[in-house]
Image (cartoon, helix red, strand yellow):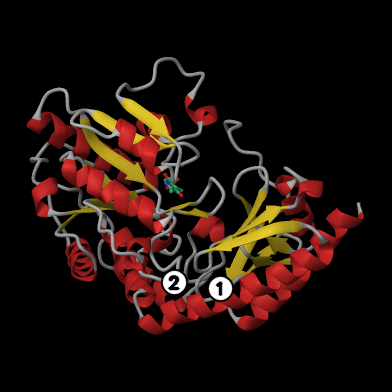
């Protein structure tokens, strides 16, 4: 394999709920959910049945035709959100690629120089060349020759900086309502409100990248529902498929109609298998009882992590929105999140990083209290090993 990843040594062969087993039969508590993807746990019987039922009927027909699961999922997404139109693809980066192309198309339809995209330092929007260029992490976009033009970056949560760069030439502002990969940093409500006002005043579209924050992760169906700002385009992926690859761009008819047949496309996007699984996952995630349980588990887990941080001196701050928790390492252990995650895996709990100084937890939304307790116990042992070493 091309050496873009450096996987840990263990190889998982089976999963159930929030537990995984490796080739040696060792078990791990999964606090990462495959980077916020297996939102309903491993081996979920409802998703398995949706996949098996659809697999027995029809896998793929292409976008020269539509299909029942895609139509059903599109309808449900539009009913549950601000959206009136959807575009299906296979990943988050592709959803953002569609959103950015649509915003550019709309901009140029209005005026040939309305092409600027405003994005934020530290944000992450995917790994295609356009999306790494829009993302605010130069390490992902540099060293490959010229980048796409017309992209401006300013600091996240900085209203004045945004005001300086958003103008008549702006076609889109793209923002994560909570910065995920960049450290679990929630936007200030007034920042999002200012972006909404600036976009409206300058006839630019506001794109919410909810690839990680969407689908129940924050305890709301989509993170925009936690506030009173409504975007023009919302992109999502990761958790909506429960582990089956799918990406979605949601938008209004006024914006979406700037695309015409042929403006954009995808071979696999909207395939019956992905849509059938995502429909089953979406039905489960939008259940208000599930969303309430996410908020409740999140609060308890964050509280216990705060205690742990205080007791062991490993964390200086715990930030969270739903079951999406960033543990900032204290000064003494600065930039050792990677090391801590290695220790955690050795102690049988899988966690994620969000930058060099943040341990990120994104459990499945359905994690049980027992799995949470066991995972926290193992994480505490790993933290103790870090602080003792
Ligand atoms: C993961 C992620 C992406 C990219 O999604 P892929 O499915 O890896 O292409 C984009 N934006 C955000 C906020 C993400 O967390």
What label sits on residue 298 in the rendered view?
A: 1
Sequence-wise, which precedes: disc 1 or disc 2?
2
Q: Quadrant of the N terminus?
A: top right
Question: SS class of the residue under badge 1?
Answer: helix
- Camera sees residue 128: no
Q: Position of residue 267 (x, y in %)?
A: 25, 43
What number is the disc on residue 219? Answer: 2
Q: Residue furthest front?
A: 160
Place of residue 307 in the rendered image (x, y in percent of width and height, measured from the top left): 74, 71
Local packing at callout 1 (Cα closer than 10 Å; few below 14, some 14-19, many 20+) is many
Res 351 → quadrant = bottom right
Q: Residue furthest top?
A: 145
Q: Nearer the viewer, residue 246 or 271?
A: 246
Is residue 380 found left or right of 111 in the rendered image? right
Q: Using residue 29 as the reference point, say whether residue 283 is left or right of it.
A: left
Q: Nearer the viewer, residue 92 or 25?
A: 92
Residue at the far bottom in the pictured view? 289
Residue at 17% of width from left, 28% of height from top?
114
**Residue 131, position in %: x, y?**
38, 35
* Relative image position of residue 258 (x, y in whole percent): 10, 41
Residue 360 appears anywhere in the view = yes
The quarter of the picture where residue 266 lies is top left
Residue at 41% over, 72% down: 47
Tag 1–tag 2 contact (CB < 8 Å): yes
Left or right, 69 with reference to 45: left
Q: Does the beta carbon of the residue at mark 1 sit less than 8 Å from ligand 1?
A: no
């Amino acid at each position: 394999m091309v050496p873009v990843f450096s996987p840990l040594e263990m190889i998982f062969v089976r999963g159930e709920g929030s537990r995984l087993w490796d080739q040696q039969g060792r078990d791990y508590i999964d606090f990462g959910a495959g980077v916020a993807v297996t939102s309903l746990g491993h081996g979920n019987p409802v998703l398995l049945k949706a996949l098996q039922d659809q697999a027995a009927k029809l896998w793929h027909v292409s976008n020269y035709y539509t299909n029942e699961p895609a139509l059903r999922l599109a309808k449900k997404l539009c009913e549950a959100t601000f959206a009136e139109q959807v575009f299906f693809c296979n990943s988050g980066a592709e959803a953002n690629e569609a959103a950015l192309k649509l915003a550019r198309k709309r901009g140029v339809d209005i005026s040939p120089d309305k092409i600027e995209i405003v994005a934020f330092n530290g944000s992450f929007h995917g790994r295609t060349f356009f999306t790494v260029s829009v993302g605010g992490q130069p390490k992902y976009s540099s060293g490959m020759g010229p980048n796409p033009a017309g992209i401006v970056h300013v600091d996240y949560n900085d209203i004045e900086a945004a005001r300086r760069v958003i103008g008549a030439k702006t076609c889109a502002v793209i923002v994560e309502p909570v910065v995920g990969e960049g450290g679990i940093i929630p936007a200030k409500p007034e920042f999002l409100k200012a972006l909404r006002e600036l976009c409206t005043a300058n006839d630019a579209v506001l794109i919410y990248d909810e690839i990680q924050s969407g689908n129940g992760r924050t305890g709301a169906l989509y993170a925009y529902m936690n506030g009173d700002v409504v975007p023009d385009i919302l992109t999502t992926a990761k958790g909506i498929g429960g582990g089956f690859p799918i990406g979605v761009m949601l938008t209004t008819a006024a914006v979406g109609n700037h695309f015409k047949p042929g403006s954009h496309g995808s071979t696999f996007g909207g395939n019956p298998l992905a849509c059938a699984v995502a429909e089953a996952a979406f039905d489960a995630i939008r259940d208000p009882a599930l969303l309430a349980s996410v908020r409740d588990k999140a609060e308890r887990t964050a509280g216990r992590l705060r205690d742990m941080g205080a007791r062991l001196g490993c964390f200086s701050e715990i930030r969270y929105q739903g079951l999406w928790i960033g543990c900032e390492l204290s000064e003494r252990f600065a930039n050792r999140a990677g090391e801590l995650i290695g220790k955690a895996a050795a102690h049988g709990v899988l966690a994620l990083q969000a930058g060099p100084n943040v341990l990120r937890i994104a459990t499945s939304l359905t994690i049980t209290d027992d799995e949470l307790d066991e995972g926290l116990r193992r994480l505490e042992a790993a933290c103790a090993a870090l602080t003792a070493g």
